[in-house]
């Protein structure tokens, strides 16, 4: 299994919107960057992705799963190179992980989110995945 991070502006499509699609899932379409498109094309069914609220929120809020691998983006002209994948919501992070926390964490200094924050679909290493899952675990009271 590979790990990824997908970004969405919550006022356009939020984590709650993905949750509302239930098992049907949602096409991840509208990606118009070749590097992000290549990342979509590398995804396999069952891969996991952090769901990141961009623009407002700036935090990882949930875990999604690839339901369908890359196919031509239905929102793009038929002759275009753009692709989409389908995702389903798996679970919210009990404690969202803000970008400011990620940027200050030495264990995440090489993360694509830190080095290339504008990339909308990006890989996450096994170590980064595990560390962010720990950061997003509920705090003991």
Image (spheres, rainbow, N blue to C red):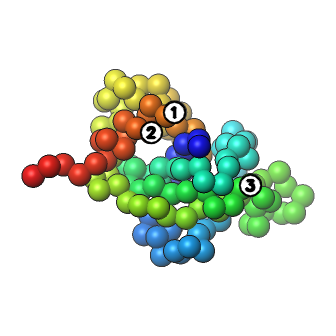
Q: Which residue is mark 3?
A: 70
Q: CA distance from mark 2 to mark 3?
A: 22 Å
Q: Secondary structure at mark 1?
A: loop
Q: CA distance from mark 1 to mark 3?
A: 21 Å
Q: Which residue is mark 1?
A: 125
> Residue at image x 44%, y 34%?
128
**Left or right: where 87 falls relative to 20:** right
| x 54%, y 42%: residue | 3
For the residues labelled 2 and 1, the Cα–Cα distance comes to: 6 Å
Mark 2: few/some/many CA within 10 Å (<14, 14-19, 20+): many
Residue count near mark 1 (Cα–Cα under 10 Å), binned few <14, some 14–19, many ≥20 = some
- Which of the pair 52/55 is nearer the observer? 52
The first of marks 2 and 3 along the sequence is 3
Q: Nearer the viewer, residue 104 or 65?
A: 65
Residue 112: horizontal and vertical position, in percent?
52, 33
Who's the residue at 31% across and 29% down the image? 104
Q: Quadrant of residue 15?
A: bottom left
Asked whether the beta carbons under mark 2 and mark 1 sit within 8 Å of each other, the answer is yes
Q: Residues within 10 Å of mark 3 (few under 14, many from 20)?
A: many
Q: Position of residue 52 (x, y in %)?
A: 45, 52
Q: Which residue is mark 2?
A: 129
Q: Is residue 78 above or below residue 53?
A: below
Locate residue 140, reporting x and y percent: 14, 49
Task: Label 2: state its secondary structure.
Answer: helix
Q: Is residue 21 visible?
A: yes
- Residue at 59% x, 43% y is 1
Q: In the rendered view, does 47 fall on the left or right side of 76?
A: left
Q: How many marks?
A: 3
Reply above or below: 46 against 113.
below
User: Can residue 114 be seen in the rendering of this structure?
Assistant: no
Q: Relative to residue 81, is residue 60 drawn left or right? A: left
What secondary structure is found at the residue carrying circle 3? strand
């Amino acid at each position: 299994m590979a790990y990824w991070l997908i970004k969405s502006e919550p006022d356009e499509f939020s984590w709650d919107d993905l949750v509302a699609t239930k098992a049907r899932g949602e096409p991840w379409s509208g990606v118009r960057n070749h590097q992000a498109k290549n990342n979509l094309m590398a995804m396999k069914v069952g891969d996991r992705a952090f769901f990141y609220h961009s623009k407002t929120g700036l935090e990882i809020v949930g875990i999604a799963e690839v339901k369908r691998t890359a196919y031509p983006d239905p929102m793009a002209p038929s002759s275009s190179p753009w692709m989409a994948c389908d995702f389903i919501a798996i679970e919210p992070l009990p404690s969202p992980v803000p970008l400011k926390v990620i940027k200050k964490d030495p264990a995440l200094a090489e993360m694509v989110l830190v080095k290339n924050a504008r990339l909308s679909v990006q890989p996450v290493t096994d170590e980064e995945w595990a560390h962010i899952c720990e950061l997003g675990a509920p705090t003991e009271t």
